[in-house]
Image (cartoon, rainbow, N blue to C red):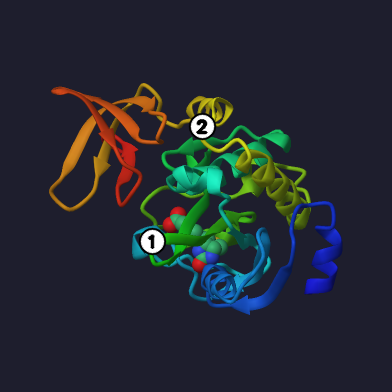
Amino acid sequence: MDSDQLKILLAHTPVSELRYFETTGSTNEDAFAWLIAGAPDFALVVANQQTAGRGRFQRRWITQADSALAFSVILRPRPEEMPFLQLYSPLGGIAVAAGLEQLQLHPQIKWPNDVLIGQKKVCGILAETAWDGINPLGVVLGIGINILPAAIPLSDSLSFPAGSLAEFLPDLPDRWEILAVILQQLKGWQSRMGNEAFMRYWQEHLAFLDQEVEIRGVPGTELSGRLVGIDPSGELILATDTGEVNIQVGDVHLRLRNN
Ligand code: BTN
């Protein structure tokens, strides 16, 4: 694969410009630098292999060659999207879930944005915003999808059971076709960010709905309760012994209780 070949495969997607790397450290880091240097809206960075990919909670996300999708989309929020900046990472989760549904899979979204199939994480998302003072310059939406089992890191480095699309799809399409489908979904859902259809899709695909879950944030601040849903700003609603609590998208881990 090279940039020119990938451009042809993604010609029917909304991608404006594209950079493809056989190997890079992190597509989010590359995209962030490109964003600052003036990349247009919906520019895309793709890598076949990542040696220092970034994950949430300062974790690493290493991508083995030929086994995964690792890409970052540069999004320049329009003025009307400014109130929804915190919804960019769920936007990624929704776009991936909707794309996987198109492939006849049954994904769920582990709030705020991990995509699960059969209770296993197949996709992680990291949204990073670049600021010019108090104004957002743009968002880098980084998405990593395990396509083959080889993409899954050793289990002792995982905080949640992981899986790959190949386990659930006997007739696995070409990885670049999967990328094209997700990019189209991303464009479609971006225009609905925060609206009723967006919130409904998110809620309907929420993993652990009505189940007892635990939220871990700063060490020592554990919270457990029944997962009730999400509020219009994207906060998680938990029914605890002392009443309903809203949890902001941020540095918190969500898991099933006693799991
Ligand atoms: C998570 O911790 O679950 C988020 C992982 C995000 C990984 C993707 S892979 C492509 C992009 N580039 C990065 O460096 N990180 C994201």
Q: Position of residue 256 (x, y in %)?
A: 33, 35
> Which residue lies at the image location 30% right of the left edge and 52% below the top edge?
251
Residue 249 or residue 135, whichever sits in front? 135
Q: Position of residue 147 (x, y in %)?
A: 64, 54
Does 112 appear above or below 9? Answer: above
Quadrant for residue 38, please give it. Answer: bottom right
Looking at the rendering, in which quadrant would you find the C terminus?
top left
Mark 1 vs mark 2: which is more N-terminal?
1
Residue 166 or residue 135, whichever sits in front? 135
Is residue 1 at least partly visible in the picture?
Answer: no
Q: Position of residue 186 (x, y in %)?
A: 65, 46
Give the amino acid type for the residue marked by disc 1 in the picture: Ile
Q: Is residue 78 left or right of residue 89?
A: right
Looking at the rendering, in which quadrant would you find the N terminus?
bottom right
**Marker disc for residue 202:** 2
Q: Does the beta carbon of the residue at mark 2 sit less than 8 Å from ligand 1?
A: no
Q: Position of residue 63 (x, y in %)?
A: 56, 67
Give the amino acid type for the residue marked by disc 2 in the picture: Trp
Does 75 appear above or below 117? Answer: below
Q: Secondary structure at mark 1?
A: loop
Neighbour tally class for label 2: few under 14, some 14-19, many 20 plus, Cα within 10 Å: many
The total of numbered circles placed on residues is 2
> Which residue lies at the image location 66% right of the left edge and 70% below the top edge?
48
Q: Secondary structure at mark 2?
A: helix
Distance CA(mark 1)–CA(mark 2): 29 Å
> Which residue lies at the image location 50% right of the left edge and 53% below the top edge?
125
Dot 1 corresponds to which residue?
A: 134
